[in-house]
Image: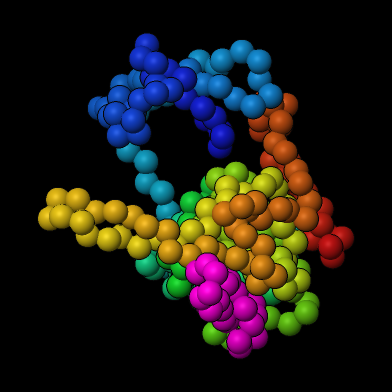
């Protein structure tokens, strides 16, 4: 499965017009059993038929290191000493902006600092976002006090609200940073990537992000019903609407079918190339 795949069938059931909850019920099942998905994938002419063995999937909040040598954290402390690659580049993979992600990110940054490296890759690919406060807290490690992280636009006649860095700002200009994004990077991921890109802290590599930049409020209608209303839009520090266009990478790198077949991560390779050259 890849980000952007469209599920046409679940086993033999046409899923294009199915409600999401109905599709989820069909895909889920007893661990060890198989569900067959028919997929439409950009760049591939014929539908793909992919059998998937069901299992319980534990997704960590954060992971440091390479795919083969990692330390994970999902509410627990990150193990130390595994985040540094042999080429001196440190990798942090962030899977969500959960309630405890800011604290886990701080611990991962300490591991990075302790490693002695000045080259950092932050992988936000497939990260759907989460808490705004977590994104602002993470950005604050790289930005001076008062620097805009994200803007909230409430519409005509209403004042804009600018959310600013807390100013932890612990890194010098020796830091060289690359952020990886793709179509699955959304919401808080886009806020963090957009802020660090526009302030010149990091280069962004990958593909166009999802474009989810709305602020919503839940309004109670009756005891059994509610209405979710969009009350504002998120903008990058330079005023780019995240909802309208998402974040455009500095270096657009697609992962092709040949890359997948060869188990090659072209986006990670580009990030490593940039850091090896000092950008």
Instruction: Say if the magenta span includes residue 9.
Output: no
Q: Residue at x 43, y 64 (%)?
A: 231
Location of the C terminus (image quadrant): bottom right
- Colour convention: rainbow
> Looking at this view, is 193 or 238 the one in front?
238
Question: What residue do we see at 66% from left, 30% from top?
Answer: 260
Q: Quadrant of residue 229?
A: bottom left
User: Which residue is at 66% across, 55% downward?
Assistant: 247
Tell me if residue 100 comes above or below residue 86 in the rendering: below
> Left of 174 or right of it: where is 210?
left
Looking at the picture, how far across and down is residue 58, in whole percent? 37, 46
Q: Is 153 a magenta residue?
A: yes
Q: Is residue 198 above or below residue 242?
A: below
Q: Residue furthest left?
A: 223
* Magenta stretch secondary structure, dominant: loop
Residue at image coords 70%, 36%: 255
Residue 33: x %, y % from top left = 31, 21
Q: Residue furthest toward the right?
A: 277
Give the mark count. 0
> Would you say residue 220 is visible in this rendering?
yes
Residue 13 location in percent, x, y? 36, 14
Q: Position of residue 84 (x, y in %)?
A: 65, 62
* Magenta extent: 141-165
The one of 161 and 125 positioned closer to us in this rendering: 161
Q: Is residue 62 visible?
A: no
Task: Name above or below for residue 103 compared with residue 205.
Answer: below
Front position in the image: 86 or 133: 133
């Amino acid at each position: 499965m890849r980000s952007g795949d469209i599920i046409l069938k679940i086993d033999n059931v046409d899923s294009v017009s199915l409600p999401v909850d109905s599709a989820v019920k069909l895909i889920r099942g007893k661990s060890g059993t198989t569900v067959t998905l028919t997929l439409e994938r950009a760049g591939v002419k014929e539908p793909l038929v992919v059998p998937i063995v069901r299992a319980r999937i534990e997704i960590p909040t954060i992971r440091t290191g390479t795919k083969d040598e990692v330390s994970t954290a999902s509410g627990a402390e990150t193990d130390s000493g595994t985040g540094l690659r042999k080429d001196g580049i440190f990798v942090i993979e962030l899977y969500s902006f959960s309630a405890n992600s800011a604290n886990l990110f701080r611990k991962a940054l300490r591991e990075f600092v302790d490693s002695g490296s000045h080259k950092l890759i932050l992988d936000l690919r497939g990260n759907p976002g989460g808490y705004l406060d977590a994104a602002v807290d993470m950005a604050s490690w790289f930005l001076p006090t008062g620097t805009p992280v994200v803007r909230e636009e409430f519409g005509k006649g209403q004042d804009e609200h600018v959310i600013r860095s807390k100013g932890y700002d612990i890194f010098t200009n020796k830091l060289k940073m690359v952020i990886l994004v793709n179509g699955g990077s959304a919401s808080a991921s886009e806020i963090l990537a957009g802020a660090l890109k526009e302030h010149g802290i990091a280069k962004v590599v990958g593909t166009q992000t999802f474009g989810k930049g709305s602020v919503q409020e839940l309004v109670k209608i009756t005891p059994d019903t509610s209405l979710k209303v969009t009350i504002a839009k998120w903008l990058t520090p330079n005023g780019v609407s995240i909802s309208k266009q998402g974040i455009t990478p500095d270096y657009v790198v697609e992962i092709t079918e040949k890359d997948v077949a060869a188990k090659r991560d072209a986006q990670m390779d580009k990030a490593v190339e940039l850091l090896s050259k000092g950008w």
